[in-house]
Image: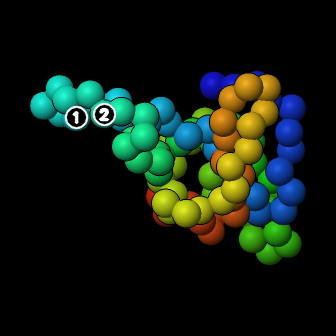
Amino acid sequence: MSNINLKPLADRVLVEPAPAETKTISGIIIPDSAQEKPQKGTVVAVGPGKKDEPMTVQIGDTVLYGKFAGTELKLEGKDFMIMRESDIYAIV
């Protein structure tokens, strides 16, 4: 887990995406250009929530989110996604 110095505001969550699959189940190697964007990741920072709406995800939770959810950003050489908690579908 990353130790990032970034505090999301309101109901936003910072997620570190899981690495993309590089091999199929049968062992075929997938080239970088054909790899799908991961839709699973680990929560590394959580905002305080909105008034009357506390946050339900916590740091360290593994979550599933939408394919086009959030905004990609790069911090300290790593890729992250920042999104609203409502863009998260489930905690795994």
| The N terminus - image quarter | top right
| Count of numbered marks | 2
Q: Nearer the viewer, residue 22 or 81?
A: 22
State the SS at label 2.
loop
In x, y percent, where is residue 55?
71, 59
Tell whether 7 sits left or right of 43.
right
Tell whether 6 sits left or right of 13.
right
Residue 58 can be seen in this image:
no
Residue 51 can be seen in this image:
yes
Residue farthest toward the left in the current orientation of the protein: 26
Q: Nearer the viewer, residue 37 or 40?
A: 37
Residue carrying label 1: 24
Q: Amino acid at mark 2?
A: Ile
Q: Is residue 11 above or below residue 31?
A: below
Tell whether 31 sits left or right of 73.
left
Q: Are marks 2 and 1 in contact (CB under 8 Å)?
A: yes
Residue found at x 63% / y 52%:
57
Q: Is residue 78 above or below residue 91?
A: above
Q: Answer few, some or many: residues within 10 Å of disc 1's Cα (few below 14, many 20 plus, some between 14 and 19).
A: few
Residue carrying label 2: 30
Tell whether 32 sits left or right of 11.
left
CA distance separating discs 2 and 1: 7 Å
In x, y percent, where is residue 20?
43, 36
| Displayed quadrant of residue 54 | bottom right
